Image (cartoon, helix red, strand yellow):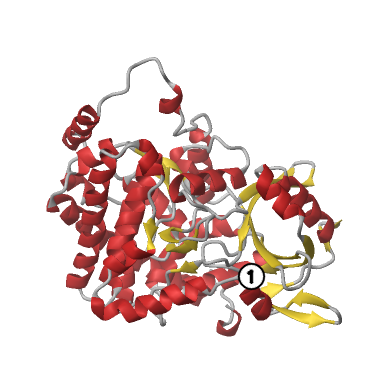
Amino acid sequence: MTRARQALAKKTKLAKSEKFSLLEPVLSHHSKPLSIAKRLAIGKSLRHEVSFLDQGTYVPPKNRIDPIEILKVQASQRINSLMPIRHARMLQSPFAFYRGGAAIMAQDLANQPTTKITVQLCGDMHVSNFGLFGTAEHRLVFGINDFDETLPGSWEWDMKRLVSSAVIACQTLGGDEALCKKLVYRISSEYQKRMAVYAHMPYIKLAQQFIGEKDIRKHFNKAHQKTLNEYLKATKGQSNLQVLQKLTTLVGKNRKIINKPPLIEHFDSDFDGIPVADLVKKALINYSTTLLVDRKVLFSRYTLKDFARKVVGIGSVGTNCMLLYFEGDSANDPLFLQYKEAQESVLTPYLGKSIYENMGHRVVAGQRLLQGAPDIFLSSGEINRHSQDIQGFYLRQLRDMKGGIVIGSGGVGLQDFPDYAKLFGWALALGHARSGDAALISGYCGQSKELDKALFNFAISYAEQNAADYKEFCAAVKSGRIKVAKEKTI
């Protein structure tokens, strides 16, 4: 066993008895709840234990595990044939490497001081993990949109990963230090501003808060409204019918998903000796039992027509991800669901096991806590492939008024990046306030520039760490230690 495997195994073993739950303070009614003023004061007093200067200082772990070994440990738990695709995507830039390196940064965040104010962490918070999505009422809202690594933990973990990603993305696009600073300050100051409001907001009203289309427009410079309009229009146009035309074709009288190997392809007939079709049917039956009754009735009206493996993102590559195609009364009533295998969070070795045994349930619970308006078909399930091989998963619609944030390459550029930065800070504050104690966080953060400055210092330092790790990764690829796919297949 490599040192990386031993170290991660040891940390996981130490954490096995620890299960953090956001429900614990809620379920305890033995004492009178503290007032907002008292919680604000407690939060402020935490600055004596963890100063803003502490927050701004990045200290690498003394026995920092080789990042290449961490990636290899992850690869050993995934579909081996797809890992060269993941590594090729990470090779594209320091920011792409950062996106795929949540497990690498987890050990670094665990080494930094924190206030221990618990929220539901996204776990892989970066500037490409936001986007637009439709509520159950088909209202367009902005928020966090990836929750594969979600787990309860101290709010700083998300914030530090987010601001570091802003700096790394800005540097990758050719931005200077002044713009990097502007981005971090906008994220941090908006987070503080919104948290101060949420600290005094009634809980029911807080649960009803969303960042709507009008809110988004207010945050954009007039010169960038045209770009925003295109983004909003493209997102509103995302529908099951659009996916039908793009990803399927007629084969005889039936529509089938188009093979585009290795990114989209149908499975072999058997998987470890079990027909894949049987596994999918069992998974869907299990999934349907977790749906609310109105969703269950709606789902029962659709019939599975086809399914195929679909490689998505960067961090998720190598896990079992599928595109499922259903039809209602006809081909004009399609439904596309995305199946995603859920593994343990990369934060588990440092923050402890989830209270949920099913990792799909962990992801869904985290998404509901942070997002507040998830997909109507979002739910989890589990499937037994062997007597001791249980795979947790979750399903959601593939594209139904969903539009992710793309940094560069025709998406967010250096000019409109600052406009988005404020939305990033706002969305993170809303997610943390929904799941944690806004008054404690607001009391600690205040609304001064000192925390902005500290987070910028951390982000700059961590960008240097990421650059060094990326350089090591490039060398590992060159030496053959890490295998990558050819460019046209990624």
Give residue 131's position: percent from left, percent from top. 43, 64
Residue 209 or residue 107, whichever sits in front? 209
Residue 310 appears in which quarter of the rendering?
Answer: bottom right
Q: Is residue 164 above or below residue 435?
A: below
Q: Secondary structure at mark 1?
A: helix
Q: Which residue is at 46% across, 68% downward?
A: 404
Give residue 21's position: percent from left, percent from top. 47, 33
Residue type at mark 1: give it.
Asn
Q: Is residue 126 visible?
A: yes
Give residue 446's position: percent from left, percent from top. 17, 44
Q: Is residue 62 visible?
A: no
Give residue 17's position: percent from left, percent from top. 52, 29
Q: Is residue 402 above or below residue 124?
A: below
Q: Which residue is at 16% across, 34% downward?
A: 48
Q: Which residue is at 26% across, 69% downward?
A: 418
**Is 164 on the left or on the right of 19, as rendered?**
left
Mark 1 highlights which residue? 240
Quadrant position of the C terminus in the picture: bottom right
